[in-house]
Amino acid sequence: MVKLLYSPHLITRRIMPENQEFPMLALSSRVTPEHLFYIRNHFPYPNVDMRTWGLSIEGCVNKPIHFRYHDLLKMPQVTLPVTLECVGDKRSFFQPKTRGEQWGLGAISHAVWTGVRLQDLLYAAEVRRNAREVTFEGMDKGVRTDMPGVFSYTRSLSLEQALHPDTIVALYMNGKPLPFRHGYPARLIVPGWYGMASVKWLHRIVVIEEHFQGPFQVVDYVFDRKPLTPSASEPVTTIRLNSTIAGPTDQEVLAKGENWVWGIAISGSDPVVLVEISTDNGNTWHAATWLEQQETYSWRRWCWKWTVTESGTYDIKVRAKDAAGNTQSEMADWNVKGYGYNAIQHIRVYVD
Ligand SMILES: Nc1nc2c(c(=O)[nH]1)N[C@H]1C(S)=C(S)[C@@H](COP(=O)(O)O)O[C@H]1N2
Ligand SMILES: [Mo]
């Protein structure tokens, strides 16, 4: 039987497979409640039978291991707040349009993840010297439109990234066992990276000696720029500096007086240090106020009180700056697959 899940709280982009986004306007806490967390699936949901489920570590290791669920639960656990963002987030803003799910602002959400360090599992299996990458296989599979065959959702990481102490096999999300749609019983969490790396319904880890060539590694999730030359193709990794206005919304009509502009900022590498708002199409900028502390791998909410005395049409913009001095640009970094949109967001509001 095909599982059809659909959440009325989310903004639906596709029902089968389920692809739904977080309604940014519902941003009211740092942690996204489970029923509002965005969902990104390539395939129908897998059938997970906990009587037989296990996580195997095999390939280029001295001691292949098969972990049962309770084995993992008994191991030392770490807890990390991590924002997941789909690299297709904001794709609908690219001009010209690019193919794929037309995500708006909300293919991004934040949760607190608990699980075992991947390095603990890999050390237990004794990775051999000639290992180069580690592949992660999800239990979901299906066909692709661009090539024949049935594929599982499988991704790889360099051995170095796999051994990073913050790369975890998560068993809990926000203090409860992972919800099925977010990868129960176990999923990879690669903090700071776009969401495609965080493989759900994980059941097989294979250590390999070569570069993984699966379609979710070398066909999808690469920035392709035309004309296509080898140097113009680079793999998608960390989350780009970005900021988003949750409210007001584009084309909203406001009253004169005090209005709050509010939203989130994120970066997968250098921390965001400043968010600025403009209400005159980018001529003058005002620093927003943080609603919470900077925390590695986490989005950060901000707000700014806008006192409007005159009726009119206002072009509001938001831009973030990071600790390395980078800032968002006006121009989107257009690429064939519509990945990594992080141009300055622009909305128009009317004050009556
Ligand atoms: N097994 C599996 N893992 C997966 C995917 C998938 O389709 N199958 N999608 C990936 C992508 S592209 C993203 S953005 C995140 C989304 O995680 P979420 O659905 O828990 O929000 O999961 C990643 N892990
Ligand atoms: Mo994604």
Image: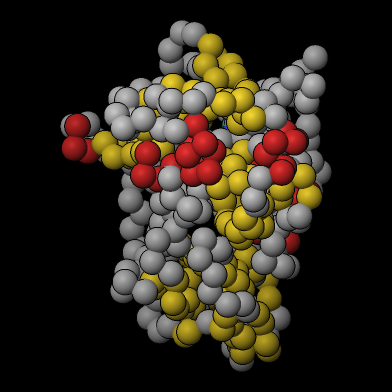
Can residue 281 be seen in the rendering of this structure?
Answer: no
Identify the residue at horizontal 71%, vertical 43% (top origin).
74
Identify the residue at horizontal 37%, vertical 39% (top origin).
159
User: For this view, does 144 lie left or right of residue 186?
Assistant: left
Please name whichever residue, 217 or 178, is drawn nearer the observer in this view of the structure: 178
Query: Which quadrant, please, contains the C terminus?
Result: bottom right
Which quadrant holds residue 16?
A: top right
Query: Which quadrant, please, contains the N terminus?
Result: top right
Measured as percent of width and height from the top left, residue 166 is found at 50, 53
Please name whichever residue, 94 or 205, is drawn nearer the observer in this view of the structure: 205
Identify the residue at horizontal 18%, vertical 32% (top origin).
229
Please name whichever residue, 133 or 227, is drawn nearer the observer in this view of the structure: 133
Can residue 66 be seen in the rendering of this structure?
Answer: yes
Q: How are the residues colored?
A: secondary structure
User: For this view, does 333 lie left or right of residue 33?
Assistant: left
Measured as percent of width and height from the top left, residue 246 is found at 62, 65
User: For this view, does 256 lie left or right of residue 221?
Assistant: right
User: In this picture, is 233 found above or below 277?
Assistant: above
Identify the residue at horizontal 48%, vertical 37% (top origin).
122
- Residue projecting furthest to the top: 148
User: In this picture, is 291 found above or below 206?
Assistant: below
In this figure, what is the number of numbered marks? Answer: 0
User: For this view, does 289 lie left or right of residue 19?
Assistant: left
User: In this picture, is 305 found above or below 114?
Assistant: below
Measured as percent of width and height from the top left, residue 31 is found at 69, 62
Which quadrant holds residue 244?
A: bottom right
